[in-house]
Image (tube, rainbow, N blue to C red):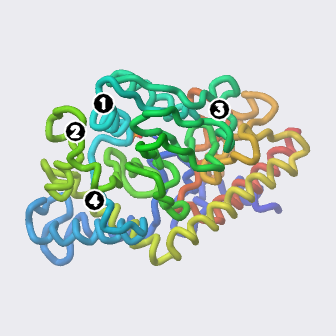
Amino acid sequence: MTSVENLLRTAAVRPMASGRVFNFSAGPACLPIEVLQQLQQDLVDLRGSGMGILEVSHRGPLFDQLLDESHSAFRRVAAVGSEWATLFIPGGATLQFGMIPMNFLPDGGHADYADTGLWATKALVDAKTVGRVNTTFDGKAFAFNRTPNANEAAPTPGAAYHHWCSNNTVDGTKWTVVPQAAAGGWLARDASSDLFSEPLDLRHHGVVYAAAQKNLGPSGMTMVLIRRDLLGKACRKLPSMLRYDEYDKHESRPNTPNTFGIHVVGLICQWIERNGGVHAMQRLAANRCGLLLQAIDQSGGFWRAHSERACQSPINVLFRSPSSELDSSFVAAAAAAGMDGLAGHRSTGGIRASMYNAMPLEGAQALADFMGDFARRNG
Ligand SMILES: Cc1ncc(COP(=O)(O)O)c(C=O)c1O
C-alpha cells in the first residue's frame, strides 16, 4: 500500500503524530507545535503570575520583559544593527501599503512601484491615493508568472523610494534579483511571505515589513524594520498611529498593543533560533519546494506549474491539473487525507501549496506522494 493510499484509508486519522493536519494555507498558516503548546500554558498562567498573557497589563513589568525578549529575539534573527528600529505595528501588511506613502511620498514627488502580483498591485493602488506613482514593472500581461530580470524594473530619477514584494504569495513567484533604488532613494520591501525564510538582505533598504500570520504568528499585526534615520522624517503631518517615530518612541505601544501577538512573535523567533536560524529555514524551504517540483516534473505533464521555474517561490507553489474539476477533487481528496488549505487564491484558481517555516518536510513529502498518486489515477 502506498503512503497516499494509507493516508486515504485512514482519512479520519490525522497525519502528524501530534494529531494535527498538514496545513498548506497561505496565512494564517501553520505554527510550530511547541510554540502553540507553550501558548496554551501562557494563556492560563504566564510565568507563574497567576494571570494569562491576555490578562497582564501592557505597562506592567511582566509585559515589559516579554516585549524586550520579543524585540531582542526578532533583532537577533533579523541580524540587524542599531541603525535599524524594529516595530510591532497593528493593522496587517495592508496598513503599510498606506503608511509608507503617507510618511515618505512627498507632495510634488513620486515613488516607484514594481507590480509583480496581487499584493504588489494593492500596495501600488493604495499609494496612488496618496501621491504620484510610477510603475517600474507590470506583470499583469503574463499573469504574474515571473518577476523582473536584472534589466527590468529600473528605478526612475528622483523617486523617493522603490517598493517591491519579494515573494508573491498569490502568484507563487519570488524575485531572483534585488531591485535598485533611485539615487538618494531607498527600497521598501513587502516581505510578508518570506521574512525569515532566508537571510535578510537589508542593503539599500529603508523599510522592510511583514504581516505576522505566515512566518511570525497571529494575523492583525506586522513587523516593521525601518532605518533609524528615516524615523521622524515623515513628509506630512499625520495622526500618531500612522507615524513610525511614535511606535519607536513608545516601544511599539503608543496605544494598547497586541500583547498576545508580540509574545507569539518572540516565541517564534526563539523557535527559529533553536532550529538553526534563517539559513536552516532557507534549506528546508528549498527541500520542501523541490519535492513538489519533482512531483510536477514526474507527472508526465499532468501537473503544470504556474510560475516560470527560475522565479518559482520556494514558499508558495501554484500548480494545476488538466481541468478545474480535477483541481477541485484533488483539493477535496487531499483535505480528506489530512492536507488542508490547498485551494488556489480566489483570483487565480488552481492549487496552491503554501509552506512556511513551520511546515515540516514530511508535509511536503506527503503532498508530493499524493500528487503523484492522483496524477497516476487521473492522468
Ligand atoms: C505579500 C503579502 N503582502 C501583504 C499581505 C496582506 O497582509 P494583511 O492581510 O495582514 O494586511 C499579504 C497577505 O497574505 C501578503 O501575502
Residue located beneath label 4 in the image: 262
Compared with residue 147, is residue 193 higher up or lower down, i.e. above or below?
Answer: below
**Disc sitting over residue 144 in the figure:** 3
Real-space Cα distance between discs 3 and 1? 29 Å
Inter-mark Cα distance, 2 to 3 = 31 Å
Can you tell which mark lies on residue 106? 1
Callout 1–callout 4 Cβ contact below 8 Å: no
Q: Element type at marker 1?
A: loop
Q: Amino acid at mark 1?
A: Pro
Where is residue 207? Give x, y as percent.
38, 49
Q: Is residue 60 toward the left or the right of residue 379 in the image? A: left
In which quadrant of the rendered image does the C terminus lie?
top right
Q: CA distance from mark 2 to mark 1?
A: 15 Å
Name the mark on residue 242: 2
Quick check: marks 4 and 2 in contact, CB under 8 Å?
no
Q: Which mark is residue 97?
A: none
